[in-house]
Amino acid sequence: MGIEPMDAARPAAAPLACLDEPTARGFARLRAWLVDRIKRRALVHLHRTRSGELLVLRMCLIAERATEATLQADLAPTAPDWLQKQIAWHLAEEQNHVRLFADEIAKRGAPVDLNARPDWISARKIARWRALALHHAPRFQAGVLVPTYAVGMCAEQMATRVVKRHVETIGAAHPLAPVLHQVLDDEDKHVRLCRATLQRAVRPEEEAALAALLAEVRAIDRGWGVRGALWMYAAGLAYRLRPGEPAGAQAGA
Ligand SMILES: [Fe+2]
Ligand SMILES: [Fe+2]
């Protein structure tokens, strides 16, 4: 499904350059590379065992549930009429992602917990993003809608990176690959949706405030990168070293 046209709340403005993901340089670039390498190795280890694979699937499920909750609880009740239809189909797609990952867990004979809490690192990141959204809301005429979509866009960009890395690591022949490809297509679309919404909702004179907000959101995301990667790697290794641990659906690498 394409991005729904929105009512012209105001005339189209010049594209907001701050919506593009900045290119990392220097130490930030090195750190991003390191995080990516560690997470790729972690995914290899995790997919080699059944418990590791289930941990990955549960992390995916929890992330999708968090997005679903944001759309349902934070956005839908307060969004203007011109956004309601697109929130409804965005929500439907996130709910489909929840179903896809829940089915993969069930296929492996494990219980599905739709109320599982995010891990400590993810919970801290979500809490800081929520606080940031409330703090920045008064700086925009459209209120909390703008920071909520700014955080949402960064989260969708992060999801795109995460799913892309995942599918590249396990390879096209892995049984999970079709699911990840479908999710990746949708997350890519959601990034474009968030961009289009911000482009409409942010007034030209508010661009500097949006750029400052996005910089803070991305800094929070980067701040947990190394710790999150090491945690994943340690978990993957621990499962592989556990005696008698059954193998995953297919060793990806
Ligand atoms: Fe999703
Ligand atoms: Fe999404």
Image (tube, grey):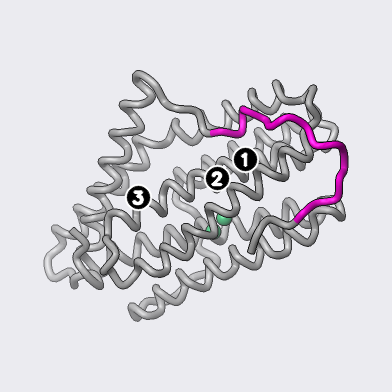
- Amino acid type, label 2: Ala
Measure how far apart labels 1 and 2 are at the Cα level: 6 Å
User: Is the CB of mark 3 within 8 Å of ligand 1?
Assistant: no
Badge 3 local density, few (<14 within 10 Å), some, or many (20+)? some
* Residue bearing the label numbered 1: 151
Judge whether residue 9 is colored magenta.
yes
In-image side of 118 versus 171 (left or right): right
Judge whether residue 200 is colored magenta.
no
User: Closer to the N terminus: mark 3 or mark 1?
Assistant: 1
* Picture quarter with ligand 1: bottom right
* Residue found 42% across the figure and 26% down from its top: 24
**Which of 56/9 is in front?**
9
Measure how far apart labels 3 and 1 are at the Cα level: 21 Å
Residue 132: image x %, image y %?
Answer: 65, 33
The kind of secondary structure element at disc 3 is helix
* Residue bearing the label numbered 2: 155
* Residue found 47% across the figure and 65% down from its top: 182
Q: What stretch is highlighted in magenta?
A: 5-20
